[in-house]
Image: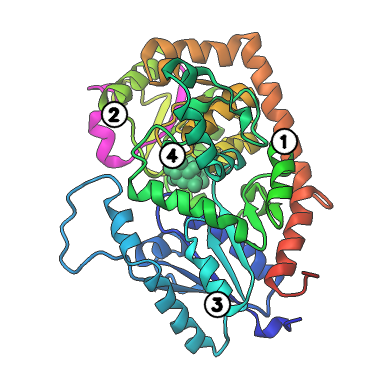
Amino acid sequence: ETPTYTNHVAVLAFPFGTHAAPLLNLTRRLAASAPNATFSFFSTAKSNCSIFGPQHHGFGNIKAYNIDDGVPEGYVFAGRRMEDIELFLSATPGNYRKGIEEAVLDTGKGITCFLSDTLIWHAADMAQEMNVPWIPFWTAAAGSLCAHLYTDLIRETAAKLNDSGLETLPLNFVPGMPSALSIKDVPMEVLGGDLNSTFSHLMHQMARTVTRGTAVAINSLEELDPSITKHFKSKFQDYLPVGPFNLTSSSTTSNVDPHYCLTWLNKNKPSSVAYVSFGTVTTPPPHELIALANALENSGMAFLWSLKDNFRDRLPQGFVNRTSRRGLIVPWAPQSKILEHPSVVVFITHCGWNSVIESVTGGVPMICRPFFGDQKMNGRLVSDVWQIGVQAQNGVLSEDGLMDAFDMILSNDQGKNMKENVVALKELAVKAVGEKGSSTMNFYTLLGIVTGSSSL
Ligand code: U2F
């Protein structure tokens, strides 16, 4: 057993989308429970700045290290999708290794454990070289991890089907997958997209490596996906859903409310406000933004919309003024607090995993407009498996489709069912993070691995 005071945990974040924030959230929780251990958190300066705040040195026994983002001096971005990610990956894993050397020198402590975003699969090799545990942390849903794990099986199966078969084949030929999912719901990196892209290769390599983890951690709860949980418990050395994180800690930087959204919500009636956000990476195309604005205007509903300032001028002319008495548009909203607010009745979302899990813990039904990656599968889990939301009609935001969806969620039996289902899941989540709950017990197991005091 390693005594706690020599413990030095290397935390390797993936610095894009909402990946680093939940990993820091987990790190803070571990660090608070292991006050004598040292945690070195590696990400790019930009990412560290956004999650640690402008000083970005760290918190308590967590120290932040900025690693190379792979962008050459004077580089001019062409604006390609994934350009920043590709540059970053060209510097990986050398950038992390360099940061780790610095942290070891700094602290005088060798690394005793690796906790990394699953996408930084190189951590498996680093941990092996040092003969210490590696804990991969998957920032999305169990369902998408399961699809990636079975990439080869899914591709082989699809190759035998014609197009119409592809539309309808239930995904339950993949171990653990609910039959309400179909093969067309899997991430594009698994099937349907450019399988030779850097990102597809990264995900494939991730899937081949993740089973080497001493334990796989995830921001979810066992009870949300019983069949996948059962399968993962046999597939991985250990499988540890330790979420939902927004129920286990409140001190995240994303909870700041500079635009007084919560004060504004307080002035609205219970179950009356539509909340709109498409996460940190995506904004819908112009015609969908307009359709959404028109639907919000014509529905007469109150709404709170998190929309980056540079997209405001894409809204219909006069929309902001005409709706100013019942609509609030802000560049950043404390989303998880908003979804817990009793005024919020529906969430129009891209189905990023953090958004879905926050909507579940807020007990808010969703209208799903997924864009890329895991989002389509998350949306399908929401609408067809958990039945806590609806898909945008034909997969896109249209005025009529949204009006129908509002109608269903606000005044139909189907909407009532969704609300009941989401509240039931919320209760499961609250139980999971409670004393002796599954996520709490899994957290102790994780803590044991991290501090070297588990019976491995
Ligand atoms: C990538 O996710 P995104 O950043 O696009 O979206 P989410 O997973 O939904 O995370 C958004 C987070 O940002 C917060 C919100 C979520 O925690 O509460 N937020 C906020 O507080 N205020 C705002 O105004 C807007 C957002 C990727 F695109 C997804 O496909 C993945 O599922 C995800 C996780 O791997 O990462």
Residue 35 visible in the displayed image: yes
Residue at image location 53% in from the left, 11% down from the top: 407
Mark found first going from the N terminus, 3 or 4: 3
Circle 1 or circle 2, nearest the eye: 1
Q: Is residue 53 above or below residue 452?
A: above
Ligand 1 contact, mark 3 (Cβ < 8 Å): no
Residue drawn at (77%, 69%) of the image: 456
Residue identifier under label 3? 129
Residue at the spot of label 4: 373
Residue labelled 2 has its Cβ within 8 Å of some atom of ligand 1? no
Front in this rendered view, residue 261 or 384:
384
Pointer 4 local density, CA inside 10 Å: few below 14, some 14–19, many at least 20: some
Q: Position of residue 199 (x, y in %)?
A: 38, 48
Whole-angstrom CA distance, mark 4 to mark 2, is 17 Å
The answer to whether residue 279 is magenta is: no
Q: Mark 3–mark 4 contact, CB under 8 Å?
A: no
Mark found first going from the N terminus, 4 or 2: 2
**Three-letter amino acid code at disc 3?**
Glu
Query: Could you give the CA–CA distance between mark 1 and mark 2, rounded to whole angstroms?
Result: 36 Å
How far apart, in angstroms, are the residues tagged by discs 3 and 4? Answer: 32 Å
The alpha-carbon separation of the residues under discs 1 and 4 comes to 22 Å
Q: Nearer the viewer, mark 3 or mark 4?
A: 3
Crowd tier of the residue under label 2, counting other residues whose Cα lies within 10 Å: few below 14, some 14–19, many 20 or above: few
Residue 450, image quadrant: bottom right
Mark 1 is surrounded, within 10 Å at the Cα level, by few (under 14), some (14 to 19) or many (20 or more) other residues, namely some
The residue wearing badge 2 is 285
